[in-house]
Image (cartoon, rainbow, N blue to C red):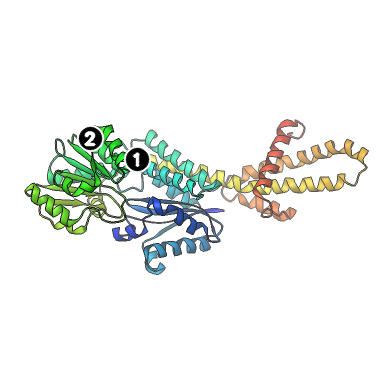
Amino acid sequence: MSLLVVGLNYRTAPVPLLERAAVPTADLAGVLADLLSGQYVTEAVVLSTCNRVEVYAAVTGFHGALNEVGEWLSARTGLHLGPLADHLYIQYAEDAVRHLFTVAAGLDSMVVGEAQILGQLRDAYNSAQQHGGPASLLHELMQQALRVGKRVHTDTPIDRAGQSMVSAALRIAEERTGPVAGRPVLVAGAGSMGALAAATLNRAGATPITIVNRTQAKAERIAATIGGRPGSFEDLPSLLAEADFVVSVTGATGQVITAEDVSAAQQARGGRPMAILDLAVPRDTEPAVASIPGVTLIGIEQLAAALAGQPATAGVEAAKGIVDDEVDAFMSWQRAIDVAPTVAALRARADEVVETELAKLAPAARADAERTVRRVVSTLLHLPTVRMKELAAAPGGDWYATAVRDLFGLDVEGATAAEVVAVTTAEVVAVTTDPEAAR
C-alpha cells in the first residue's frame, strides 16, 4: 500500500478550472464513493479550498490509481485527461507525504505561513471519515500532518505576521480604497472563512459588520461573537448599498453577487468607492462587477498576482527543516508497519509447524513437550523478527521482509487484517511475559 496525491491549485490551474473541480460538502459522499469504486484506490480524502483541489489516496498500484483519479477529475471538470494533465501535479510515496506536510505547514499556501489551511485540512479529514474515505494509512497520515502543521506554527515564527487569505486581500483593498477602520462592511457566508473574515475585519476596526448566510442561525452566531449584526441573505442586494467593503465566501455553486445588484448599489451610494473581496471557489461574484465605476473587485486571481514575488516569510527554512524531519519519521513508521504482515505470517507458519508436530505425539507426551517447543520457537524467531522490524525502518529495508517471505514461502496477502493483529499481538505477549523467550 502506498500514497498518491493528485491535485491542482492556484499555481497550476486558472480559477474557472478550479471552480469546476471544486467539491462542495454536499457532493462529498458521492465523490468518495466514485473514487473508492475502482480497483486501485482503497482510501481517499479530498481537500477542496478556495485555491486547491487535491485527492489524497492510499493505493495498491500507481498507474492504475492515477488513471482512476484522473478519470474522476476529467469527468468532474469536463476536460479530457490530456489537456487536464497540463494543470495537475502528481506525488507518490514519500513525495506524497512531503507534499501533504508542506501543505499543512502553510508552505504551499498563497499566503505563506497562513494557519487556516490546518482547519481546512481537519475539516476535509473529518468529512471524509463520515463517508468512509480514510482507513488506517490515511488516518495516520492525516493525524501526523495536523501535528506537523501545529508544530511548525508553534516552533517557528512563520505566522508571526498573522496574515491569512482574508487579511492579505484586505490589505490590498485598503491600498486602493483607504482604511477599513470605522467603515461599514458586509460578510457573505458564515462558514470557517466567513468567521475568519468577520474576526479579521473586527480587529481592523470596521464598524458596523453585517453577516449574512443562507442559514440564519449561523449568521447570528458569528455576529454575536464580534458584536456585529446578522442580516437576511434575501436582503443581500440592498445590504450591498450600505457596505464600503464586502467579503464573500459563501461556497455557493452559483454567483450570488451580480453586476446588476452592484450597479444598483453604487447608484444608491452615489458612486462611493466599494471593495469586494471574493475569496470563494466557485466565485460568488460576476466578473462584470469589476467594470462598474468605483468598484474594486479582488478575487483569487488578483490576490495571487498581487502576492507573487513577495519576500519569504520569516521561519520558512526552519519550517522546511521540520517537514523534512517529520517526513523521515513517517516513512520509517510506514516501512515498519509494512513489515508487520510478514512478521505475523512467519509466526503463523511457526505455529502451524509446531501444531503439526505436536499432533503426532501421544496426549501425555504432548503436554510435557508443548511448552518447551513453543519456548524454543519463540526464542529462535525473536531476534530475526526484531531485527527485521528495525532494518525495515531504514530506506531500502523492505528488502529483508521480501527475503524472509521468499525463504519461508510465506503467504502474506492471504492473511486477513484480524489474523495479522492477532498473531502480532500474541508474539508481543509471548516475548514480554516469557524471560527465556526474550533472551
Q: Quadrant of residue 365?
A: top right
Judging by the rendered image, the residue that carries numbered circle 1 is 115
Q: Label 1 sits on what residue type?
A: Ala
344 and 378: which is toward the camera: 344
Disc 2 or 1, which lies upstream in sequence?
A: 1
Residue 107's place in the image compared with 61, above or below, is above
212 and 437: which is toward the camera: 212
Q: Which mark is residue 228?
A: 2
Q: Where's the C terminus, which quadrant?
A: top right
Mark 2: secondary structure:
loop
Mark 1: secondary structure:
loop
Q: Label 2 sits on what residue type?
A: Gly
Residue 112 in percent (x, y) is at 32, 44
Q: Which mark is residue 357?
A: none
Q: Quadrant of residue 55?
A: bottom left
**Which residue is painted at 77% across and 32% down in the image?**
436
